[in-house]
Image (tube, helix red, strand yellow):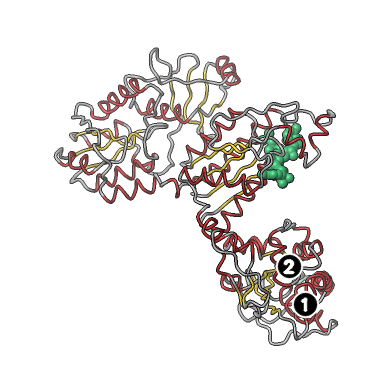
Amino acid sequence: MPNPPQYCPTPRELDDLELLVTGALAPLSRFDEPGSPVTLTLPDDVAAPAAEAGAVELVDPEGLPLARVNVPGGEVEALTHVQYGPFRRHYLSPAQVREAYAGRTFVPVTDALTEAQVEDLRALGPAVLLAYVGAGTPALSPVGLIRASLAAADLLADAAVVAVPLAAHGDAELDHQLGVQVAHTYAAGDPVHALAEPADDAYPPSIAAIVDFDRPEPADQGLVLFFTGLSGSGKSTLARALMDRLLEQGTRTVTSLDGDVVRRNLSAGLTFSKADRETNIRRIGWVAAEISRHGGVAVCSPIAPFDETRQQVRAMVEDAGGAFFLVHVATPLEECERRDRKGLYAKARRGEIPEFTGISSPYEDPADADVRVDTTGRTIDDALADVVEALREAGYLDLSAGFETVAAQPPQPADASSSTTRDPRLVEEGELAPVAKPAEQPLKVLFVCTANICRSPFMEVVARKLAGPDASVTFASAGTHGFRDHPMDEVMGGTLAGRGAEVGDFASRAVTRQMVDEADLVLTAEAAHRTFILDDQPAAFRKVFTIGQFAEAVRAADTSLAGRELVRAVGDRRGTADAMLDVADPYRRGPEAAEQAAVGIEELLRVIIPRLTGRA
Ligand SMILES: Nc1ncnc2c1ncn2[C@@H]1O[C@H](COP(=O)(O)OS(=O)(=O)O)[C@@H](OP(=O)(O)O)[C@H]1O
Ligand SMILES: Nc1ncnc2c1ncn2[C@@H]1O[C@H](COP(=O)(O)OP(=O)(O)O)[C@@H](O)[C@H]1O
């Protein structure tokens, strides 16, 4: 006889299995008893080998074998008991409960207890709260319900909490009967007390705090913003614009899961077949759901052409406690094809790209979109306003406030003799508006590398030399992992001599938030340094660049721009911080590596400094 195949069942089936094994579902002792909702459904590719082997081995999501189940028949032979998971010590079998708590009153609990319900229980004497935490049941998460039940037990004279993974089976009547039956199995003749329906949601303070944490207000909930639509419809453009606003507001952590970008890393190697597209979207969904579990915002912008896969993502996110907000970028095919930004539609029409969405592969319009935006003939800001408004109405995010307020302010005089220079963009986009600076303040540039002893001091010293004594630009440097008061590395310092520059009384230091806040421009040696800073201060993204990235942007920028205007223009149209443009670390690699780094940095500074000082 062949070995039974392994199969990881659904969360509902896993819960049923646990209760079958502990005897909590008695008289049920196996799956698939006629008329019972406790069923096990094997997919075709498992059912056939299971029938041949006469059994299937059920494993948990990590592959731990839990039980062997006869096929057909459904009888269960336990192999291992799950030992992990929060509050595992409260998951007791009826036999264990008999031993510890015989003689008490048993109370099934499916939600946080209100003041009135706790009061009702006070009269009962010693009690056991049976927290029904199975898949699909509790109004709170399983952990939330156990915590809330423990908090209720604390308010009672003598109450214990037992977690019972009794799942919902999609039939309210049958599930109710099962719940009553399980309570009586645990009680084994002791009284069972049914709680009265709550008349209100007045919770005792300790329970209210748990409910608030478990069921956050929409504005505090993790959020997945999912843009779906044809290629060229405007998903990435709108998603990016929305992310910029979120970052500028600075109140949420944001992760982008753009279709093209995901396909270069997370989904590298996948094709555009239906199966691979589904895999791609489920991967995006999985990552996004995890982000939402931790209260973050994930902004996804794949085509996601299939309704069923989008529904799966919605379910994954909601199971993780996040909110799912679907934006259908409903720009019609004709307009997307007219734009044909990447020339893909032309190729698809010529038959050079098989299975191209909208041409030779379907796009299923969502019926469950939270907002639908056709970008045809509209500006990006205008189209974005629809999304911002829908998010505000749904209570998830309010990105409108600052923008409206400031846009409504009277325009500032564009008088060159005025004592302040204002960033027009910042005036338009509210929250950052108070950054008006006296015109005569020098532009502050901060160079950042790792330890602030090789690359960044070299940048600082050489930049100062190139700028000359009268420039209205100041230079400083710091390290992401810099030690205090170390001198410049001797080998790197040696490269200064041939350039007629001197290190002076330099002392290393670690970069701080304040330094970044005060700087007008932060130039890092590597993309990793930039990420280090922006992870902590995401709102600084318009002024933190790698030195290579900034030099590239300066080369491409309008030659009439200088100083602050130049920094601003680069910030608005920044390219990517490609690691290819990094200045490699020469530390402890000898004089040759130091000279190579010096030459590379000097070349970049010769592009940047004349433009910053306005003497190009
Ligand atoms: N056959 C075919 N069909 C559709 N799109 C194609 C295809 N081949 C390559 N591309 C490019 O890949 C981008 C879409 O990838 P996605 O991961 O978003 O697609 S999907 O959600 O898995 O269907 C899509 O990018 P966007 O234009 O940003 O949508 C295209 O540039
Ligand atoms: N109102 C608008 N909203 C979004 N994009 C627009 C709008 N009007 C024109 N476009 C242009 O349409 C193109 C959309 O491309 P992109 O955002 O990459 O789409 P997708 O990610 O859906 O493939 C961009 O060139 C963008 O500038």
Q: Which residue is mark 2?
A: 566
Which residue is at 56% across, 64% downward?
A: 410
Name the spot of residue 185 as percent of width and height, x first: 27, 26
Q: Which residue is mark 1?
A: 492
Q: Nearer the viewer, residue 34 or 210?
A: 210
Q: Earlier in the sequence, mark 2 or mark 1?
A: 1
Q: Residues within 10 Å of mark 2 (few under 14, many from 20)?
A: many
Position of residue 427 relative to residue 606, above or below, is: above
Name the spot of residue 125 as percent of width and height, x first: 15, 40
Which residue is at 69% across, 78% downward?
A: 475
Name the spot of residue 532 as percent of width and height, x first: 62, 62
Q: Is residue 545 visible?
A: yes
State the image quarter where residue 588 is shown: bottom right
Q: Quadrant of ligand 2?
A: top right
- For residue 584, the mark is none
Q: Amino acid at mark 2?
A: Leu
* Placement of the C terminus among the 4 image quadrants: bottom right
Q: Amino acid at mark 1?
A: Met
Name the spot of residue 153 as percent of width and height, x first: 24, 44
Mark 2 secondary-structure assignment: helix
| Horizontal side of residue 126 vs 514, given as left or right | left
Q: Nearer the viewer, residue 227 or 142?
A: 227
| Horizontal side of residue 223 vs 171, given as left or right | right
Mark 1 secondary-structure assignment: helix
Position of residue 463 relative to residue 324, above or below, is: below
* Placement of the N terminus among the 4 image quadrants: top right
Q: Is residue 271 visible?
A: no
